[in-house]
Image (cartoon, rainbow, N blue to C red):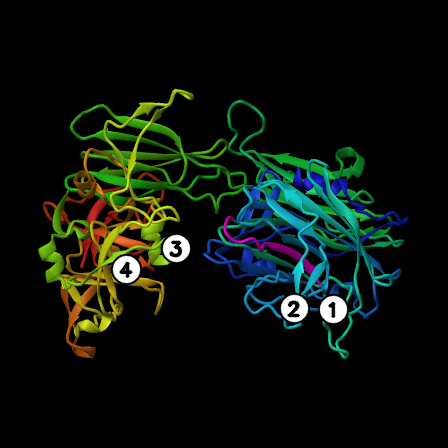
C-alpha cells in the first residue's frame, strides 16, 4: 500500500498544468545497499534498511536511554541545473515524504520531524523544543515541523503532535523572554500506521501549503504556513530565513522510539518533457498465492508517474510497455527465472536512465536460530534464549522457531511451534535440542544443540543471605535505616512498593467480581505520603577504606576484595542492602561499577543474579512468613558469562616477562544505584572438558566454530572448548 499511495498522489497539492515533474531529489531506499550509504546520520541505537511487502525503508531505532537525533542533508544544489540556473522558474517547488511511528516514547516527549532550511540542526538535540539542555531560543528556519506533545500524564500508546505550531513567548519576573512550542491543536498519529506529508512551497510569497494524510485516506491536518523573513530573536545582520528545504531532521525521544521513513521527494512542475527513473522494489518472495510455497517465485513492484510510460525488460529477455492507467503507477513483475530486470520510462521525447536489478530466484535459506545459555543450575538444567534475526533476510519476514527436545534417557520428547525470537526454554535433563526456523516462502534451517554439559557449583557468593558474621567480616559494620519517599535513585528501594510476597492462605473472594483477592506483605515496608516506616537496613564501605588495588591486563581494576576471589564495585562505595544484595550507592565516575570474579578456569560459567529497585525484576512468591520470603528473594535479571568467551587471562609479571597462569577473571558490571547483585555463582563443568559436545549445525557448507553456549565464530579467538564440524575440540 505504501508504494501505491505514492503513485496515486503524484501531483501532490499542485494544480498547475504541466508536461511532467522534474524530480530534484528522490530517496526511496529500494536500491540502498545499507543504511550507511543513504547519507543519513543518526546518534541513536541503530539505523537500518528495513523492508516489508511494499519495499525497503529507513528505520531509526533509539535503543538508548536518552533521546537522539538523525538527519539527512541534500543541500541547495538540487534546485539548480549544471549551469547554475534555477529550476524554480515560477518560484515554486513541491516536496513529500512518508513516515511511521513504529514505537512511541514513554518517558520523554520531544520526538520531532522537521524539514529545515538554512540552519543546521544541532547534533543529538531536538530542533525546536525548549526543554532540551542548552536551548538558546526558537529556531524558525523550517518549512514543516511536527513536534510531539504527549506528557507523562497522558495514557496513550499513540503519539500526540502539533504541526507547524507557533512559538509562544513567556516573560519571566526578571524580564527574560522564553519560548515554548504551542501544544494545541494536537493530532493523533497511530503507532504503526503510515502517513504522508505533502508540501507546496512558494518561495516568493513565503508560504507553505501543507497536507498530512494517513495511508487510509484520512486527512490529519491541512493548512498554510507563513514563514517570517527573520527569526524572532534574530540579529539585525542575520540572513533571512531561506525557503529552500535543505534536509530532514528527526528526533527520537526516550525511551525506545522507533521511526520509519520512505519516499522522500522534492520536485518542480515543468512544461518540458521529463522522464524520471522508475523505482524497482522486491515485494514478493516464495508466495505466488497458491497453498504451497514456491521457493523460486519473485515479485517486483515498479513505480512510475502518471505522465510517463514504463518499459520493462524481464529476466527472460522480453520487453513490455506499461501505461500508468494499466496499474495506477505500480506495475508488478513476476518471475521464477534468475537474471537481470531492467526498467525505464519515457515521456514525450525524454527517456530516463535504465534501472537494473539482479534477480536471484534460488530459494532463500533462513538463518539458523541460536540458543544462548541464559541461566544454569547444578546438573544438566539450563535455560536457553532462542534468537533469530531477520535483518539480513529479504522482506524481513516474521521468522518462527520450532523446537523438539529429546531426552537422552528415552523419555517423551518436548516440542513447541511458532515461538518468537527471544523466547526462553528450560530443560532439566540431558538430551538433544533441535531448532528449526520457518517462514512461508523461505527454506527452513535446522540446527541441533546437545544439552549434555553438566554443571556443579564451584563457588557461591549469596549476598542476599549473608549472615551477620559474614557481613561484619566483609566490612559492613555501620548500619543505617533507609527511609525515603522519593521515587528516585537509591530511595526507590523504599518508595516504589514493589518488593513483596503474597501471604499464603490469604485469598478471599471479591463479592462483586468473584475473583480471588490476596494480601501482599511488604517485609521491607515502604514509604509514602501516608506511611513513614523504617524499612531497610544498609551498611556501606567507603572507597578509601581499603588500600588494595588489582591491575590485571584488560581489567585495570582499582578496588578491593570483599570475599576470597571476588572484588566488588571497584573504585566506589559499596553498599550492602540486608536480605537483598550489593549496590553501588552513587552515579559518580560512570554508571557501571564492576564485580570482578577471579581464579576461574576456561570452562567455568559465572551467573550473576540481579534485581532492580523498580521491583519489576523481583519475584513475588507465595509465602507463610517473612523468613520464607528472604530465603527465596532473588533477581530474575540473570547475566551469564562464559569464561571461554569473555574471560581475561590472569598473568604474572609485567611487559615481555608476563606469562599466563591458566586462570581467568570475568568482569560483571552492575548498573548505577538502582541494581543490586543478589548472588554470584561460579559453575564448573562436571567431568572436565571431555563432557562437552555443544552445537551440531545441520546447515550445508557450515564450517564455523561454535562455543559451548551457541556463539558462532569464523575462527576461535581465545582458548576454550569449541565444536567444529560436529566434533569437540580444545583450543589452548
Q: Which residues, given as a range, are shown in magenta? A: 106-116
Residue 540 lies in quadrant: bottom left
Q: Nearer the viewer, residue 606 or 438?
A: 606
Q: Earlier in the sequence, mark 4 or mark 1?
A: 1
For the residues labelled 1 and 2, the Cα–Cα distance comes to 9 Å
Residue 352, labelled with which disc?
Answer: none
Q: Residue 240 location in percent, x, y? A: 78, 71
Is residue 269 shown to the viewer in this render?
A: yes
Q: Are marks 1 and 2 in contact (CB under 8 Å)?
A: yes
Residue 715 lies in quadrant: bottom left
Residue 308 against residue 94 in the figure, above or below: above
Q: Nearer the viewer, residue 377 or 239?
A: 239
Q: Are marks 3 and 4 in contact (CB under 8 Å)?
A: no
Residue at left 61%, top 57%? 250
Badge 1 marks a residue whose secondary structure is loop
Instruction: From the image, tell me which residue sits under label 2.
Output: 137
For the residues labelled 1 and 3, the Cα–Cα distance comes to 40 Å
Q: Earlier in the sequence, mark 1 or mark 3?
A: 1
For the residues labelled 3 and 2, the Cα–Cα distance comes to 33 Å
Instruction: From the image, tell me which residue sits under label 3.
Output: 486
Q: Nearer the viewer, residue 320 or 87?
A: 87
Left/right placement of residue 271 relative to residue 201 reads right
Q: Earlier in the sequence, mark 1 or mark 2?
A: 2
Residue 232, labelled with which disc?
Answer: 1
Q: Earlier in the sequence, mark 4 or mark 2?
A: 2
Does the magenta segment cover residue 11?
no
Left/right placement of residue 294 relative to residue 199 reads left
Residue 717, labelled with which disc?
Answer: 4
Q: Quadrant of the C terminus?
A: bottom left
Amino acid at each position: 500500500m505504501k508504494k501505491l499511495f505514492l503513485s496515486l498522489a503524484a501531483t501532490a497539492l499542485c494544480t498547475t498544468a504541466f508536461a511532467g515533474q522534474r524530480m530534484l531529489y528522490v530517496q526511496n531506499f529500494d536500491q540502498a545497499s545499507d543504511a550507511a550509504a543513504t547519507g543519513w546520520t543518526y546518534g541513536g541505537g541503530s539505523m537500518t534498511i528495513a523492508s516489508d511487502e511494499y519495499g525497503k525503508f529507513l528505520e531509526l531505532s533509539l535503543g538508548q536511554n536518552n533521546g537522539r537525533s538523525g538527519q539527512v542533508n541534500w543541500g541547495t544544489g538540487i534546485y539548480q541545473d549544471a549551469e547554475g540556473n534555477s529550476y524554480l522558474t515560477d518560484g515554486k517547488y513541491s516536496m513529500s515524504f512518508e513516515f511511521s511511528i513504529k514505537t512511541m516514547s514513554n518517558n520523554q516527549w520531544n520526538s520531532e520531524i522537521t524539514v529545515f532550511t538554512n540552519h543546521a540542526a544541532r547534533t543529538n538535540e531536538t530542533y525546536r523544543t525548549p526543554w532540551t539542555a542548552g536551548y538558546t531560543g526558537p529556531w524558525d528556519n523550517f518549512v514543516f515541523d511536527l513536534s510531539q506533545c504527549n506528557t507523562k500524564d497522558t495514557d496513550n500508546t499513540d503519539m500526540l503532535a502539533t504541526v507547524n505550531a507557533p512559538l509562544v513567548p513567556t516573560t519571566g519576573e526578571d524580564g527574560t523572554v522564553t519560548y515554548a512550542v504551542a501544544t494545541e491543536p494536537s493530532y493523533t498519529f497511530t503507532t504503526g500506521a503510515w502517513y504522508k506529508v505533502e508540501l507546496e512551497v512558494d518561495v516568493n510569497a513565503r508560504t507553505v501549503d501543507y497536507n498530512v494524510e494517513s495511508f487510509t485516506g484520512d486527512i490529519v491536518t491541512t493548512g498554510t504556513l507563513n514563514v517570517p523573513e527573520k527569526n524572532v530573536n534574530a540579529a539585525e545582520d542575520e540572513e533571512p530565513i531561506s525557503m529552500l528545504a535543505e534536509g530532514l531532521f528527526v528526533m527520537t525521544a526516550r525511551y525506545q522510539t522507533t521511526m520509519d521513513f520512505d519516499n522522500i521527494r522534492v520536485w518542480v512542475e515543468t512544461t518540458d518533457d521529463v522522464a524520471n527513473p522508475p523505482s524497482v522494489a522486491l515485494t514478493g518472495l516464495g508466495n505466488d498465492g497458491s497453498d504451497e510455497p514456491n521457493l523460486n517465485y519473485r515479485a517486483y513492484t515498479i513505480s512510475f508517474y502518471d505522465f510517463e510510460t514504463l518499459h520493462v525488460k524481464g529476466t527472460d529477455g522480453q520487453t513490455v510497455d506499461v501505461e500508468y492507467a494499466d496499474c495506477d503507477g505500480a506495475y508488478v513483475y513476476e518471475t521464477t527465472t534468475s537474471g537481470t530486470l531492467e526498467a525505464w520510462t519515457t515521456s514525450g521525447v525524454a527517456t530516463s536512465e535504465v534501472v537494473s536489478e539482479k534477480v536471484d530466484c534460488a530459494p532463500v535459506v533462513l538463518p539458523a536460530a541460536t540458543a544462548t545459555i541464559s541461566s544454569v543450575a547444578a546438573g544438566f538444567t539450563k535455560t536457553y534464549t532462542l534468537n533469530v534475526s531477520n535483518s539480513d533476510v529479504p522482506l524481513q519476514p516474521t521468522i518462527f522457531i520450532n523446537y523438539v527436545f529429546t531426552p537422552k534417557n528415552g523419555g517423551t520428547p518436548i516440542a513447541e511451534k511458532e515461538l518468537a525470537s527471544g523466547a526462553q526454554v528450560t530443560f532439566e535433563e540431558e538430551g538433544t535440542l533441535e531448532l528449526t526456523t520457518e517462514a512461508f516462502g523461505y527454506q527452513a534451517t535446522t540446527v541441533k544443540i546437545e544439552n549434555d554439559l553438566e554443571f556443579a557449583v564451584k563457588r557461591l557468593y549469596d549476598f542476599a543471605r549473608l549472615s551477620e558474621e559474614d557481613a561484619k567480616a566483609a566490612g559492613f559494620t555501620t548500619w543505617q535505616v533507609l527511609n525515603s519517599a522519593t521515587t528516585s535513585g537509591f530511595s526507590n528501594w523504599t518508595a516504589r512498593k514493589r518488593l513483596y510476597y503474597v501471604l499464603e492462605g490469604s485469598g478471599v473472594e471479591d463479592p462483586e467480581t468473584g475473583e480471588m483477592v490476596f494480601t501482599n506483605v511488604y517485609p521491607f515496608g515502604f514509604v509514602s505520603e501516608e506511611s513513614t516506616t523504617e524499612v531497610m537496613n544498609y551498611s556501606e564501605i567507603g572507597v578509601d577504606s581499603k588500600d588494595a588495588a588489582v591491575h590485571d591486563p584488560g581489567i585495570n581494576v582499582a578496588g578491593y576484595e570483599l570475599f576470597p576471589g571476588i572484588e566488588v564495585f571497584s573504585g566506589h562505595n559499596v553498599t550492602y542492602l540486608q536480605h537483598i544484595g550489593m549496590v553501588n550507592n552513587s552515579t559518580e565516575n560512570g554508571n557501571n561499577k564492576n564485580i570482578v570474579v577471579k581464579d576461574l578456569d576456561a570452562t567455568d560459567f559465572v551467573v550473576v543474579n540481579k534485581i532492580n529497585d523498580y521491583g519489576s525484576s523481583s519475584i513475588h512468591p507465595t509465602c507463610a512468613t517473612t523468613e520464607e520470603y528472604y530465603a527465596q528473594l532473588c533477581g530474575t535479571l540473570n547475566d551469564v558469562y562464559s569464561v571461554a568467551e569473555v574471560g581475561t587471562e590472569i598473568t604474572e609479571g609485567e611487559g615481555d616477562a608476563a606469562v599466563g597462569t591458566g586462570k581467568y577473571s570475568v568482569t560483571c558490571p552492575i548498573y548505577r544505584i538502582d541494581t543490586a547483585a543478589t548472588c554470584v555463582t561460579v559453575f564448573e563443568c562436571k567431568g572436565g572438558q571431555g563432557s562437552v559436545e555443544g552445537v551440531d549445525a545441520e546447515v550445508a557448507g557450515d564450517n564455523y566454530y561454535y562455543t559451548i553456549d551457541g556463539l558462532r565464530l569464523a575462527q576461535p579467538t581465545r582458548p576454550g572448548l569449541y565444536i567444529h564440524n560436529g566434533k569437540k575440540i580444545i583450543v589452548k
